[in-house]
Image (spheres, grey):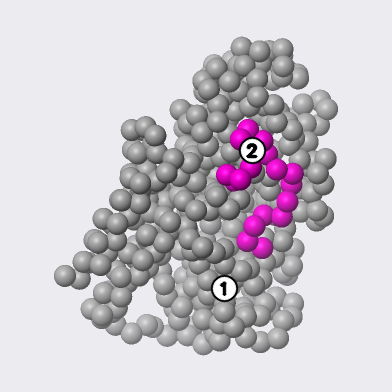
């Protein structure tokens, strides 16, 4: 049976979901099954994108295939590489806030984070006045627009990050192996399909085990309802800093996160579930970029994480998740983010928000204004993420 190995992997993956240590309620399990469905789709897509001689960029994460506390502001692409081959990446820069590139020496596993062999953003490359660019990755010597591949290079990841969802436009990008341009791959064989189904199954179980372990490395050793000082994001993204934490809140409690608006081109905050994926960012305000957020007169942004509606613009809806993750990112930075630019966290009763939240009166929004905010999110995601 051609698909037997994959079918067995799906069965094993379902057990991983059901035995996750944090599952307490039926809703936790339902969300896990939904996460499993997205992981199945992603694993098949990844296996069929495992093409290093005739490569293409695959959409690594979207609203239906989430993983790794995906950033709602970011479009993720990846392509596989051979370290001894040369690849041409061409495209046209859009108006998004950040475009960055990262070469990894492998994939994430339950016991390791892959090393970043090369990481840079588009400030390191030449871009023509019309936005077009061409860069190369290969075994040659480094130079302007040429980035060497180490002996273990395995994957190129590209991230395109929005801050103003409504007005920024995505760019275009493609990848080709330089010595294969104009040629065609060999005909598809049954043995190739067998291998791909087998690879997809291994990717599925590894993916689930990895991102259930990932929070233990970076989050769960922290005190609950706190956030770290800004630090370079794990995994070698040299131009990204982050502050991370995990929360546990009763329905009558709120977490106020206060952080200065930075001079970084991109700054954003998001919530995630214990499955280590973003919450519904389309139909609920579970994330905010600095462009979307209200900035108070003192130059700070004050976010209210709560189940009950506090009636303010920077409410982050926890959508029934009394436990979860919260992360702030700074991207395309030109200097280290100092500790003073990090967040302050306070847990207060929701009923005391009017007294405890600075600039409360100015931050208030009406139900009609809130509905407009959600409608704008729905329209923007539909435009930029076609699934």
Quarter location, residue 173: bottom right
SS label for mark 1:
loop
- Which residue is at a point 55% across and 50% down the rendered structure image? 216
Q: Position of residue 21 (x, y in %)?
A: 42, 44
Q: Is residue 22 left or right of residue 250?
A: left
Residue 105 numbered tag: 1
Q: Residue at x 57, y 63 (%)?
A: 113
Q: Note whether residue 373 is visible.
A: no
Residue 282: x percent and y percent?
48, 37
| Residue named by callout 2 | 223
Q: How far apart are labels 1 and 2 at the CA level?
A: 32 Å
Q: Nearer the viewer, mark 1 or mark 2?
A: 2
Looking at the image, residue 282 lies above or below residue 75? above
User: Does residue 16 appear anywhere in the picture?
Assistant: yes
The residue that appears at 52% across and 40% down in the rendered structure is 272
Instruction: Tell me whether circle 1 and circle 2 mark residues in contact (CB < 8 Å).
Output: no
- Residue 295: numbered disc: none
Residue 169 sits above or below residue 371 on the image? below
Q: Give the residues in magenta.
A: 219-236
């Amino acid at each position: 049976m051609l698909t037997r190995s994959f079918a067995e992997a799906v069965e094993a993956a379902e057990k991983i979901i059901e035995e996750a240590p944090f599952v307490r309620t039926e809703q936790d399990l339902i969300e896990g099954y939904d996460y499993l469905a997205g992981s199945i789709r992603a694993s098949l897509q990844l296996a069929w994108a495992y093409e290093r001689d005739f490569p293409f960029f695959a959409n690594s994460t979207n609203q239906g295939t989430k993983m790794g506390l995906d950033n709602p502001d970011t479009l993720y692409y990846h392509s596989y590489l051979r370290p001894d081959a040369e690849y041409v990446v061409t495209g046209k820069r859009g108006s998004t806030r950040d475009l960055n590139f990262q070469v990894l020496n492998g994939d994430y596993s339950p016991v390791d984070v892959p090393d970043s062999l090369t990481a840079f953003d588009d400030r390191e490359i030449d871009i023509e006045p019309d936005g077009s660019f061409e860069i190369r990755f290969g075994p040659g010597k480094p130079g302007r627009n040429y980035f060497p591949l180490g002996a273990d290079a395995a994957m190129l990841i590209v991230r395109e990050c929005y801050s103003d969802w409504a007005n920024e436009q995505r760019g275009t990008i493609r990848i080709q192996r330089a010595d294969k341009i104009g040629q065609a791959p060999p005909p598809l064989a049954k043995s190739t399909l067998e291998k791909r189904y087998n690879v997809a199954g291994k990717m599925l179980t590894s993916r689930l085990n990895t991102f259930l372990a990932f929070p233990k490395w970076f989050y769960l050793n922290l005190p609950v309802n706190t956030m770290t000082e800004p630090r370079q994001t794990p995994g070698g993204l040299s131009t990204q800093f982050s502050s991370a934490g995990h929360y546990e809140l009763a329905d009558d409690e709120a977490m106020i996160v206060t952080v200065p608006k930075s001079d970084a081109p991109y700054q954003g905050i998001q919530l995630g579930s214990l499955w280590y994926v973003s919450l519904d960012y389309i139909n609920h305000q579970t994330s905010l970029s600095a462009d979307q957020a209200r900035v108070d007169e003192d130059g700070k942004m004050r976010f209210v994480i709560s189940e009950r509606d506090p009636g303010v613009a920077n409410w982050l809806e926890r959508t029934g998740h009394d436990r979860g993750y919260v992360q702030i990112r700074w991207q395309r930075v030109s200097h280290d983010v100092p500790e003073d630019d990090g967040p302050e966290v306070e847990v207060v009763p929701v009923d005391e928000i009017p007294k405890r939240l600075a600039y409360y009166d100015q931050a208030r929004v009406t139900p009609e204004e809130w509905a407009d905010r959600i409608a704008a999110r729905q329209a923007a995601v539909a435009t930029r993420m076609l699934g």
